[in-house]
Image: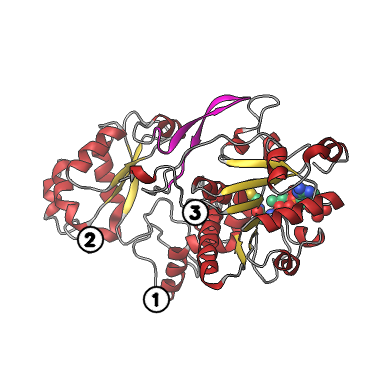
Amino acid sequence: MHNGAASNAKALDGIRVLDMTHVQAGPSATQILAWLGADVIKVELPGRGDITRGQLRDVPNVDSLYFTMLNCNKRSITLNTKTSDGKDIFTRLLRHCDVLVENFGPGVLDRQGFSWEKIQAINPRMIYASIKGFGPGKYVDFKAYETVAQAMGGSMSTTGSEDGPPTSTGAQIGDSGNGIHTVAAILAAVIQRTHSGRGQRVQVAMQDAVLNLCRVKMRDQQRLAHGPLREYPNKEFSDYVPRSGNASGGGQPGAAVRCKPGGANDYVYVIIQPHVWEPLANMIGRPELVTDPAYATPEARLPHLDEVFAVIEAWTQKFGKFEVLDKLNEIDVPCGPILSTKDLLEDESLAGRMIVDIEHPERGTFKTVGCPLQLSDSPVDYRRSPLLGEHNEEILTEIGYDTGHLDELQSAGVL
Ligand SMILES: CC(C)(COP(=O)(O)OP(=O)(O)OC[C@H]1O[C@@H](n2cnc3c(N)ncnc32)[C@H](O)[C@@H]1OP(=O)(O)O)[C@@H](O)C(=O)NCCC(=O)NCCS
């Protein structure tokens, strides 16, 4: 439970993050750091800012949801780091901050004169985190987006149906999945710095993050050497792990079965643990299956899981997905109705916790996905994303700049 006495304190109080990130992978990481209490200073290109401010806009001339949902609790400064004054301000910011995070294309900061060696010389305590598409090797200089990482990290080849094309997931495992990995790496470096007194270079490749999330598929790739994967629904196997539709991927079989009234998301995903077979068979009105040799044990059911789930579906089709959820939970069967994005936005148990209302001066109230990390002594206070350059004066004052020249810097294109 939350400790009331410490309610204003945050886990990352005192940590300053120089946020040179854009699009999704980097901003998703720095938003979590901001929610955990870090002071995140987002550095943006003057005039335009993070390219997502203007992408997929739903309201004309207003920061897009793409931007507002990935940049909460941050401050924004505009700065052209290719100008000489811009480099000077950036150098002061490097001295001022603890962590630098960037996800530019390969070599961008080096081209601007800010190599790791240079950054270390400016601030030996700096933790410099980079997100790139790929780690060392032949792909290192290539740019990457979400689906490129999914394609090259093992996800697309293993997602989808056997007779369909490679498929990307709705979950953004290459971008936001990478962001979570990057947060873990940064926090580890912050802890190590408390002992070593030194910063360090942190690099997390999107391909590597996706591969880490495809661990069980790589498990199965090695199991293939010993024969077909019996728990997979596929009948034929080659020398790579096939796309296996909605098979559970774990040791317990599962499938998505249809419910009433038969719409696109009227399904419940049901998992059959061995010990729930008997109450499940009774609930669906097929008690004879408990002793039928073709159904009685997990081993017996394995070769004909299609029929097993067809029997279950004959029952689930009589009910709505939420009714099935309640009924199956009464007998402890792990299951999940397929929740649409609309269902999630309206879900009472997520409201205010994972679906959060944010006030924005230009777009009014919008909903965002909240912080999935719940810390009892570091509750998240949600604040809207900053307008472009909203904190220019405030931040420049903090790093000791004479803000009397702001107009000049602005007309020179530095800010
Ligand atoms: C996402 C990505 C493909 C976008 O590519 P892009 O639009 O060409 O942008 P880049 O990051 O390569 O470079 C942006 C340019 O803007 C410039 N720029 C950006 N912010 C700037 C600033 N504040 N001041 C001056 N210049 C700036 C950079 O210097 C660079 O110019 P250069 O190529 O002349 O050096 C690329 O950034 C990338 O591969 N990032 C790493 C992987 C990643 O995070 N991908 C997922 C994003 S969700």
Which residue: 38% across, 46% down? 6
Residue that carries the numbered disc 3 in the rendered image: 159
Which residue: 55% across, 60% down? 186
Residue nearer the viewer, 65 or 375: 375
Does any portion of residue 278 appear in the rendered image? Answer: yes
Amino acid under disc 1: His
Which element is circle 3 on?
Answer: loop
Q: Residue furthest bottom?
A: 226
Asked whether 356 falls inside the magenta stretch, the response is yes
Ligand 1 neighbours mark 2 (CB distance < 8 Å) = no
Instruction: Tell me where residue 226 sits by quadrant.
Output: bottom left
Residue 135 rendering spot, x and y as whole percentages? 64, 67
Rounded to the nearest angstrom, the CA distance separating label 3 from label 1 is 23 Å
Marks 3 & 2, CB-CB < 8 Å contact: no
Q: Residues within 10 Å of mark 2 (few under 14, many from 20)?
A: some
Please indicate whether residue 71 sits to the left or right of residue 371 in the image.
right
Residue nearer the viewer, 95 or 114: 95
Rounded to the nearest angstrom, the CA distance separating label 3 from label 2 is 25 Å
Asked whether 306 falls inside the magenta stretch, the response is no
Residue that carries the numbered disc 2 in the rendered image: 298
Residue 106 rendering spot, x and y as whole percentages? 73, 60
Which residue: 72% across, 38% down? 393
Amino acid under disc 3: Thr
Residue that carries the numbered disc 1 in the rendered image: 226
Up/down of 313 relative to 277, above or below: above
The region drawn magenta spans: 351-372
